[in-house]
Image: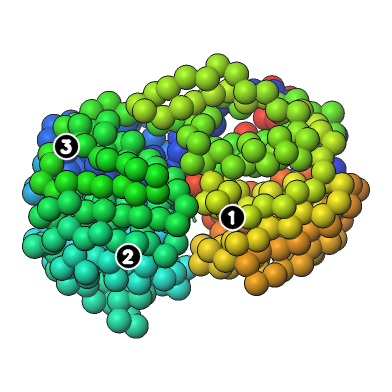
């Protein structure tokens, strides 16, 4: 897509929007639905490019998946029912699809080949191929299985007790999905708790999963029963408008149906700690996942320190938190976030580089960044998403508080997780 001119110098955001489905939960609904017995219906599925890549891979594995306007219907083939794919499984830009799929396929006696786009080809896969090989999976790939394309010959796995060196839901979920097909029990322990959507959804499909602190256990050989899933709105998508509402003058916006899983609500903790005027209403549960409606207003903000166990609870929100910090009083220091270097882009580099172009005072560190809030408008500039959806959306929100013209290169990446992002932003600018 061509460069676009972003809307700048916005004097007010107002209105109500319903946040689209959670990306992590949408992926898992398709994956678990595919290996369940019977039909699974998924409401509020996120039709973002990443989740469409998951659907396309499972269709190639012989699963019938019908996408309708209101829901997605998956005819489960049972735990042993996936077909050997004739074609290569293309996971596009999605790390979640790649790592969870490789875990699931490791346990099934099929040969398959998994490939993604240029960004996926640079993202480390050893974090899953090492434990999966310990379980008995035969996986080949560039640099001894660290990079795609990966060739998998699955089957005959044995449960392991794995201490993960990183808090990563993709690592944990990949091993748990392999563990479904392994003999004995598979145990994963993390240094901090990562998002637990896989555990919650396995239970919604009738599986037993034990949790004790940062340890999760699954017994192999369990069957899944097709179910009805209602996907909550994605808090990682809501984060862009939470920040926009807090920093654009004269704003008050309500975001409906936001997933409030405590492993994901680090952004809420940070907004409140920085002094944001945020109301949480209508709290409820759907399919073992908490939801709420959030109202945010223009706020006086103060810088904070963000580190340690908070990092996995807001890892995908760090680009937009960096923007938030540019509009706060004082310094914000983000530490312990070197995982940012292995996302769709090196997000320490892309956040610091792109926000600097708009006049922000921000510097990178080895494992994070330091932002000195200016409390005045950003400048104009020519910025680039670098093919990273979260960088693209962060820059579109940055433009709202920029005084000059802002041009965005590679805006198309935004459809990876939020295809109707610009229509929602325009609705709030026009005041719906
Ligand atoms: O499991 C998931 O759905 C995800 C886990 C996180 O990655 P890591 O597991 O690499 O931390 C996150 O950054 C990603 O957007 C989605
Ligand atoms: C890191 C992300 O996703 P994934 O790892 O699935 O590509 C993200 O959505 O910010």
* Label 1 lies in ligand 1 vicinity (Cβ under 8 Å): no
Which quadrant, please, contains the C terminus? top right
**Residue depicted at 34% across the width and 43% down the height:** 212
Location of residue 198 in the rendering, given as x and y in whole percent from the top left corner: 33, 43
Disc 3 element: loop
- N-term-proximal mark, 1 vs 3: 3
Disc 2 element: helix
Q: Are marks 1 and 2 in contact (CB under 8 Å)?
A: no
Q: Residues within 10 Å of mark 3 (few under 14, many from 20)?
A: many
Residue located beneath label 2 in the image: 128
Q: Is residue 405 above or below residue 34?
A: below
Residue 224: image tag: 3
Q: In this view, does 273 lie to the left or right of 19?
A: right
Q: Quarter-wise, where is residue 277 in the image?
A: top right
Residue 145: image tag: none
* Label 2 lies in ligand 1 vicinity (Cβ under 8 Å): no
Location of residue 295 in the rendering, given as x and y in whole percent from the top left corner: 67, 24
Disc 1 element: helix
Residue located beneath label 1 in the image: 308
Q: Is residue 55 left or right of residue 23?
A: left
**Residue depicted at 86% across the width and 51% down the height:** 330
């Amino acid at each position: 897509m061509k460069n676009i001119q972003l809307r700048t110098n916005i004097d007010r955001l107002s209105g109500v929007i319903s946040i689209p489905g959670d990306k992590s939960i949408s992926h898992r609904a398709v994956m678990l639905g595919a290996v369940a017995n019977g039909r699974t219906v998924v409401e509020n599925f996120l039709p973002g490019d990443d989740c469409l890549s998951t659907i396309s891979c499972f269709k190639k594995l012989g699963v019938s998946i019908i996408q309708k306007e209101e829901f997605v219907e998956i005819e489960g083939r049972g735990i042993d029912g996936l077909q050997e794919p004739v074609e290569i499984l293309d996971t596009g830009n999605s790390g979640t699809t790649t790592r969870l799929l490789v875990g699931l396929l490791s346990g099934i006696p099929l040969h398959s080949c998994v490939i993604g786009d240029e960004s996926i080809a640079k993202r480390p896969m050893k974090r899953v191929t090492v434990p999966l090989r310990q379980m008995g999976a035969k996986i080949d790939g560039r640099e001894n299985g660290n990079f795609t394309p990966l060739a998998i010959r699955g089957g005959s796995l044995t449960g392991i007790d794995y201490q993960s060196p990183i808090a990563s839901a993709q690592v944990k979920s990949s091993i748990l999905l392999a563990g479904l097909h392994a003999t004995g029990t598979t145990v994963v322990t993390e240094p901090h708790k990562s998002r637990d959507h896989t555990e919650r959804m396995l239970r919604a499909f009738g599986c037993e999963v034990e949790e004790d602190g940062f340890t999760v256990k699954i017994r192999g050989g369990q069957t899944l029963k097709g179910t009805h899933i209602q996907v909550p709105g994605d808090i990682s998508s809501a984060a862009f408008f939470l920040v926009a509402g807090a920093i654009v003058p004269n704003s008050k916006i309500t975001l409906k149906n936001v997933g409030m899983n405590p492993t994901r609500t680090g952004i809420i903790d940070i907004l409140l700690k920085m002094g944001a005027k945020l109301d949480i209403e209508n709290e409820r549960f759907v399919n073992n996942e908490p939801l709420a409606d959030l109202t945010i207003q223009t706020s006086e903000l103060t810088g904070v320190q963000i580190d340690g166990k908070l990092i996995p609870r807001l890892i995908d929100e760090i680009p937009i938190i960096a923007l938030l910090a540019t509009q706060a009083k004082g310094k914000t220091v983000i530490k312990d976030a070197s995982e940012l270097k292995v996302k769709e882009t090196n997000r320490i580099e892309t956040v610091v580089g792109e926000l600097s172009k708009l006049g922000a005072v921000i510097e990178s560190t080895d494992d994070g960044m330091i932002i000195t809030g200016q409390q005045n408008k950003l400048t104009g500039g020519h910025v680039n998403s670098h093919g990273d959806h979260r960088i693209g959306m962060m820059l579109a929100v940055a433009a709202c508080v920029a005084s000059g013209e802002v041009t965005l290169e590679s805006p198309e990446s935004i459809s990876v997780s939020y295809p109707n992002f610009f229509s929602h932003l325009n609705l709030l600018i026009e005041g719906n």
